[in-house]
Image (cartoon, grey):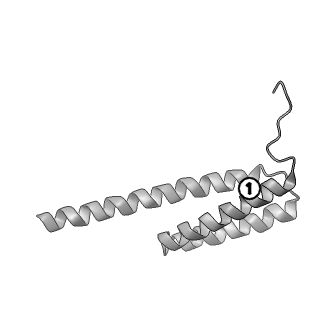
Amino acid sequence: MAADDDLTRSAEEQTRSEQELARRLREAHRRVRVLPAPPEVKQRLAKRLLAICDAAKHDVPHAAARLESFLISLDDLVSDTGSAGNIAEGD
């Protein structure tokens, strides 16, 4: 019975990591969608996200690592745009 507990715990941990990856992928898609960038840039980023989603079907840890790298690149892109994230006073 103890072995069954280990298998169940492992499956639950895997499910949590898959759910966390799914949440982070949704957030990344949202960030790309609202990014103040030319359509060509958004299209390139969306294609990268689709490749990460495809990888997630086969290898969750690898997809999570690729997503982390993607998010770092996205943060760099947003900080380079200068106006990204600026909100007019009073809004």
Q: Where is residue 12 in the image (x, y as percent from the top left)?
A: 33, 58
Q: Which residue is painted at 68% across and 62% down in the image?
A: 72
Q: How many marks?
A: 1
- Horizontal side of 16 relative to 7 (left or right) equals right
**Res 32 quadrant in image:** bottom right
- Look at 24% across and 66% down and name the residue there: 7
Left or right of 69 on screen, residue 22: left
Say what secondary structure mark 1 lies in. Answer: helix
Splitting the image into 4 quarters, where does residue 16 fall? Answer: bottom left
Residue 32 higher or lower than 73, as above or below:
above
Tell me what residue is drawn at x 84 percent, y 51 percent: 36
Residue under the image location 52 percent in, 73 percent down: 62
In the image, taking residue 29 as reference, residue 15 lies left or right, namely: left
- Residue 76: % across, % down: 76, 60
Tell me the amino acid under the disc marked 1: Val
Query: Of 80 and 16, which appears nearest the observer?
Result: 80
x then y, percent, for residue 18: 46, 61
Which of the two residues, 78 or 16, is positioned nearer the viewer here? 78
Q: Which residue reaches farthest top? A: 90
Quadrant in which the C terminus appears: top right
Other-residue count near label 1 (Cα within 10 Å), few / some / many at <14 / 14–19 / ≥20: many
Image position, residue 57 (x, y; %): 51, 71
Answer above or below: position of 90 versus 60: above
Residue 65 found in image quarter = bottom right
The quarter in which the N terminus is drawn is bottom left
Residue under label 1? 32
